[in-house]
Image: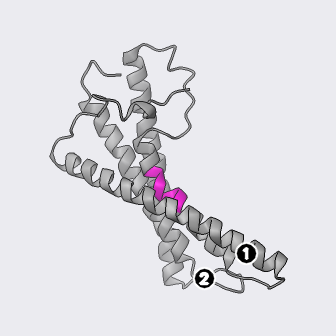
Amino acid sequence: MSHGFELAEAPGAEAPALPAPAGVLDRAMATINRLVMILGGVALVAASIVLTYSVVVRYILKIPTDWQDETAVFLIIGAVFLSAAAVQARRGHVGIEAFATLLSPGANRIRIFAIDVMTLLFCAFFAWKSWTLLHEAWVDDQHSTSSWGPPLWVPYLLMSSGMTLLSLQVLLQVIHGFVRPRGQA
């Protein structure tokens, strides 16, 4: 199954430049995506170090811990949600393409566009609900129920930001669907 992301580095595989406001957003998203992928990698390494430390301290040294699990979860939430847009920029998310081989290039273009629009609607709704969760956690000063009790606005901020970036990335793909030359699939 190919999503075409492996061709992104090939010469001539770049999408056409978008007109003014969308073009600025496209370039900004490319920069943000590069930065987020680096930060996501650092967050995953940090989470693995925290969890390894937790195992050593808890099971070998017999010292109780209370912050490592939630810290690792927060780091992983940040890495997953914030990097979703960068993965989507390469169309690297899992997709079922059983129909892609059966359809003509024009029909497949319509299928991809329709899926992008539905994905945009879902991601925008998810982002909106995530921002409402963040607002509630901030206003109500919600904290985790663990003994450490970190504020819940932290993971909600990561989730909200990540879903907003993903929504913007999918919006750019929808716009690309409008400006794509007829010869491209």
Task: Pick whichever, 145 or 77, lies toward us.
Answer: 77
Which residue is under mark 2? 150
Q: Amino acid at mark 2?
A: Pro
Q: In the rendering, at what x and y percent does residue 114 appear?
A: 42, 32
Crowding around mark 2 (Cα neighbors within 10 Å: few <14, some 14 to 19, many 20+) is some
Q: Which residue is mark 1?
A: 54
Secondary structure under the numbered disc 1 in the rendered image: helix
Residue lying at 48% horizontally and 31% vertically, measured from the top left: 3
Which residue appears at 52% of the width and 75% of the height? Answer: 154
Q: Nearer the viewer, residue 90 or 167?
A: 90
Front-lying residue, 8 or 78: 8
Report the magenta residues as a range: 79-85
- CB-based contact (under 8 Å), mark 1 and mark 2: no
Find the distance from the CA under tag 1 to the CA under tag 2: 17 Å
From the image, which quarter does the C terminus lie in? top left
In the rendered image, residue 86, in percent from the top left (x then y), is placed at: 42, 49
> Residue at left 39%, top 44%?
170
